[in-house]
Amino acid sequence: MDRKSAYAALENLAWGDLDVLHPAAQAEASAPFGPRTGTEVATLWQDLRRALPDMERRDGLFLAGDNRPDSRWTAPRAPHLVACCGAYLGTFRESFAGIPPTGGVVTLPYGEAHYFEDGRLKTSWLLWDLVALMQQAGVWPMARPTGARGHWPAPKGGQGLRLDDAPPSDSLARVLAMHDALHAFDGKDLDSMPMHHWAQDFSYWAGGNIGACRGLSGFRAHHQIPFLRAFPDRRGAGHFVRLSDGPFAVTGGDVALTHTGADYMGVPATGRKLTFRVMDFYRFGADGLIAENWLPNDTIGLLEQMGIDVMARLAHLTGQPRQTL
């Protein structure tokens, strides 16, 4: 399926056209939704549309290309994907995932990857930022993020919608080289991780309960240091998506962690082994350095593994506390 047709199909799905879905559709969705198959996929989209009846899709990034291999990822691999980052926009009329409606305009940020087969949507990976929706509704039941809250902007320069075929690029290779540099961390000194792949004033647009920051000092203070102190052994566990598209690239997969260090998001160290599902979208500037990085992530799923039931806390806050052990 060509890029423009895939873009139109996803737009139609947001407007409620379920015929876009393949009869054997599957989705890997962030917590609390989890894996979905067949009619369960359709129900998930119907529930979102019911909550935001005038919903429209606002892609800031729409990338496409061959899905490069990753030997660490053992699940079946889609040969080519479209990957999107943006937000669903609409009037929040009915509850969604237990989040009470506001009656006003909200955005639900997302990072997604999609595989089309025979012109229909066969497989999706969905990171829908329910943390942001809870924060807009005033019912986020956990600590504040260390970075800044707010909607992720589209890339500077307005070139994030890649609807025309583009020649091969080396953006992904540069991203993977940067990942190798981050894995050089010696566990003690931040300078053991070379940061020469990043522009001095890069913007880091992290979703979930991490938040946005800017430049190396902001990145270290608001994300890198809290994360490394909590999870000193963090390592990549494989990507389900790896693709380049002009000056953009995307990777998405799991980070393996052990929560042995400092508290994270207000939760003391648990000693548990965890996995953190994330997607990273990158824009390279004319100088070949990373100028922007968007990080949709499954904060709720991470906290769940740490023993924190965010959805139960939400229910309690909104008048539906547990009545049994």
Image (spheres, rainbow, N blue to C red):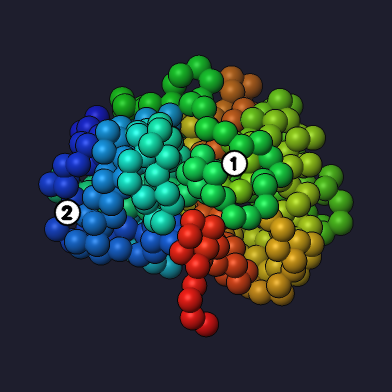
Residue at 49% x, 43% y is 137
Percent x, y for residue 229?
79, 58
Foreground label between 1 and 2:
1
Residue at 46% x, 64% y is 320
Residue at 53% x, 20% y is 156
Farthest top residue in view? 157
CA gap between label 1 and label 2 equals 31 Å
Q: Which secondary structure, mark 1?
A: strand
Q: Quadrant of the N terminus?
A: top left
Give 144 or 181, whichever is nearer the viewer.
Answer: 144
Give 267 or 3, whichever is nearer the viewer.
Answer: 267
Is 208 situated left or right of 178 in this image? left
Mark with earlier residue (1, 2) = 2
Label 1 close to label 2 by CB (< 8 Å): no
Q: Which secondary structure, mark 2?
A: strand
Image quadrant of residue 78? bottom left
Farthest bottom residue in view? 325
Q: Which residue is mark 2?
A: 22
Give 50 or 204, whichever is nearer the viewer.
Answer: 50
- Mark 2, Cα crowd under 10 Å, few <14 / some 14-19 / many 20+, is some
Image height of 184 relative to 195, above or below: below
Farthest right residue in view? 189
- Mark 1, Cα crowd under 10 Å, few <14 / some 14-19 / many 20+, is many
Give amino acid for label 1: Ala
Image height of 73 relative to 22, above or below: below
Q: Which numbered tag is attached to residue 206?
A: 1
Residue at 79% x, 62% y is 262
Image height of 197 relative to 32, above or below: above
Give amino acid for label 2: His
